[in-house]
Every structure is written in structure tokens, then in C-alpha cells.
Amino acid sequence: MLKEEDASLHTVWNFFRAIGNSAEESSSNPYEKQNTSQRINTMNYFCGLAEISSLPEYVLAFFAEHPFWQVREAVSDNPNLPIGLILKLAHDEHPDVRYALAENHRTPPHILAEMCDDENPYVSSRAAQSLQRVRNSYGFGARKNNSENERTMQLKFSYMQNAV
């Protein structure tokens, strides 16, 4: 039996599926027939929903594949984004989506390290800043070049990756 909040999410999910199903019958983009004002309203509505931290994974997955990059950007900032969607959004075509993901405090260090090599300089810079924030929060600050500190850092990052 669904709880009341789960039932409302289920209703919202069925609404999304209905949009998708009706769109498949007519065109590949369900928003194609909307005028600009309607598209902006739809996008803003979805962006607001994508930021809700209690959304189940299947709704977050829907938003992570949304045709509007702004919705994907909003979901990439969601604090409860599962690791699979983080990996997917780390390779999104739009740099603002990747930038928002680099700002997300739940993005694991190994993904941030990969994002430091992003083709977009803003994304790579933000990923480097976030990675440094993670290092500072674990007491590394400015790293020394001795093998003992390097080994300690590897163990802590390994622990953090397993905790996610």
C-alpha cells in the first residue's frame, strides 16, 4: 500500500509517463507543440520538482534524461542523486549540467577528479575547487609529497567512495 506522499509521487509519475506516451504517438519531443511561454512554464515546473530531495530514484532518472538541459541541471543539484545518475550526468552534453554536478556536495571525489579534466574550463575549475573542499574537510589542506600522507589520503578517499 502506498503512503500518501508516495501516492502523490505516483500520480506525478503517471502524468510524466502520459506526456511521454502521447508524445511518442505524435513526435519525438512532447514539448514541440507548446509555444514558448508554455515551454518555459513546463521547464520551471519540472525544475522545481527536480530539486525535491525526497523524490524516488525512478523520478530522478526521468529528470536526468529530460530534453530540457535546465531540468537536468536542477536534478544534478539534488542532494539524494544516486551514484548511477551522478555518473550519467557527469558526461552530459551541456556544460551547465556538469557544472551543477561539480557543485553538488554529494558528488564523490573520484568523479570530481575525472571532471577536473572536463573540456569546459568552468566545469574543470569548479570540479577542482570541490575536490579541494573535500580534501580540506578530511584534514588534508595543502598536500605534502611524502608517501605516508599519500597513503592516508588514498585510504580516506577509498572509505568515502564505499560510503556513497
Image (cartoon, rainbow, N blue to C red):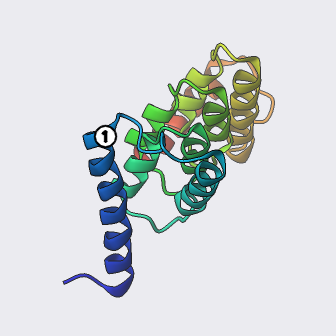
Which quarter shows the N terminus?
bottom left
**Residue 86 visible at all:** yes
Q: Residue at 59% of width from left, 49% of height from top?
A: 39
Counting labels gives 1
- Asked if residue 136 lies left or right of residue 110, the reply is right
Q: Residue furthest right?
A: 142
- At x 45%, y 48%, the residue is 63
Q: Type of residue at label 1?
A: Ser
In front of the other: 76 or 34 = 34
Q: Residue at x 70, y 26 (%)?
A: 123
Q: What's the residue at 50%, 44% (across, down)?
A: 160
Let me know if residue 159 appears in the view: no
Q: Is residue 104 left or right of residue 50?
A: right
Above or below, 19 against 49 in this view is: above
* Residue 135 sits above or below residue 105 on the image: above
Residue 85 appears left or right of 156 = left
Nearer to me, 151 or 8? 8
User: For residue 97, what is the image quadrant?
Assistant: top right
Locate residue 52, reporting x and y percent: 54, 65
Q: Nearer the viewer, residue 47 or 86?
A: 47
Q: Which residue is denoted by mark 1 in the rendering?
A: 26
Q: Is residue 156 left or right of residue 36?
A: left
Residue 68 screen position, x and y as percent: 55, 40
For the residue carrying disc 1, how many other residues have a C-alpha within 10 Å: few (<14), some (14-19), or many (20+)?
few
Residue 16 x/y as whole percent: 37, 57
In the structure shown, which secondary structural element does the residue marked by tag 1 occupy? helix
Residue 34 position, x and y percent, is 53, 47
